[in-house]
Amino acid sequence: MAFALFPIGAVGLSTVEGVSAYWVRLPTGSKPIRDIYTAGVPTATDGKGAVMMALGVLDSLVIDDCEDAWDEDVPENFTVSLDTTDKVVGTSSVKVDIAAAAAAGTILCEIVAPGTALPKFTHLEFWIKCSIATTAGDFKIHLDDNAKCASAIEVLNVPALAANTWTHVRLALATPQLDSAIISLGLEYDVDIGACTVHLDDFRAVRLATVATPLQVSQFVQDDVYFALSEPVDSAYHQNALMLVYYTSPDEDPTCSN
C-alpha cells in the first residue's frame, strides 16, 4: 500500500478535470492512485483512506453561551441586545452597538459562572463579527477573577476581522494556571475605530492536543495524484494539520499487467 504524509492547508472547492469538489493533490513525486478507500469514513487505525492529524479539542467548557445580553457593566455609548437572527451557535448572539463617541479602552463586561476554573484548558474559543474591518488588537478579550474586569488575569488580542464576516477565533491562554476562579468576561474596545456593531457568540475554554481525524474520500482520479474529500478543511480551525493518505498505486495492483 502506498503512503503519503504532507502538510495540509485549507481545502475548498476546486475543479479537476471539469469536476468541482474538495480536491487534494498528493505531493510532487508521489505514486499515482490506482485505488483508494471511498466506502465511507474509515477508523484512524484502518490503514486506508485519508486521516488528518491536527490540533483538536479534547475537552471544552462553556464560559458564556451568549444567550442573554451582557449587562455586568455596559459603558457609555454601548448598546447591548440579543440578536436571534444573526447567530452561529444556539438561538441568539450578543449584539453590541458601539457609537462613534465611544472611548478607546472601554470594556463591556458580563458575569460568568462563579469561580469558573480554567487551569486544565489551553485556549479560549469564540465567534465574533464586526460591521467594519479591524486590525489585530483593535478588540481585546478580558478574563478576570474580579468583578467588572477590574484587573484582568488574561488580556487576549482579537485578530484582524473582515467586515460583516463571522470569524471563529482560538486564542492561547497566557496563564491558565492562574485562571482558577474566573467570574467576569469582557470585550475591550481598545482602539477608537469609530462606530460599529459587534456580534459575539459561544465563548468556551478548550483543551487542545493532536488528534487523528479520519476523513471521507468521495472520489479520485485513477492513475493520477488527485482525490476529493467529502467536505472542506478549515486550516484556521485545524491548526498545523498533516494529511496521511493510504492508497493502492499501479505497481501494487495485482490486476495490473506491469
Image (spheres, rainbow, N blue to C red):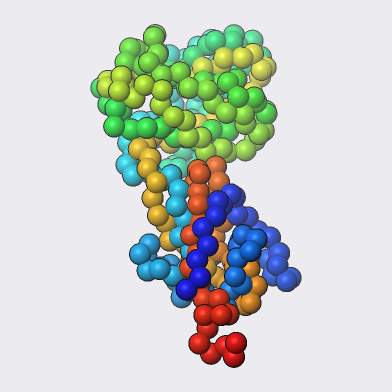
Image quadrant where residue 147 sits:
top left
Residue 30 placement, left or right of 75 = right
- At 52% from the left edge and 38% from the top edge, which residue is drawn? 168
Farthest right residue in view: 18
Percent across and percent down for residue 64 are 38, 31
| Residue at the image position 64 percent from the left and 13 percent from the top | 192
User: Visible in this render: residue 133?
Assistant: yes
Figure check: 67 above or below 4 = above
Residue at left offset 57%, top offset 88%:
256
Give the x, y percent position of residue 95.
Answer: 53, 29
Q: x, y percentage for residue 14?
A: 68, 60
Q: Position of residue 91 (x, y in %)?
A: 44, 42
**For residue 148, side relative to residue 105 (left or right):** left
Viewer can see residue 79: no
Front residue of 240/219: it is: 240
199 relative to 23, above or below: above
Vertical arrangement, residue 199 with respect to residue 22, above or below: above
Q: In the rendered picture of this protein, how many numbered marks are placed on residues?
A: 0
For this orientation, the residue located farthest to the front is: 258
| Nearer the observer, 129 or 35 | 35
In the rendered image, the quadrant that contains the C terminus is: bottom right
Q: Report the side of 192 relative to 80 (left or right).
A: right
Above or below — where is 257 with respect to 192? below
Q: Write the residue at 55% across / 64% down.
A: 229
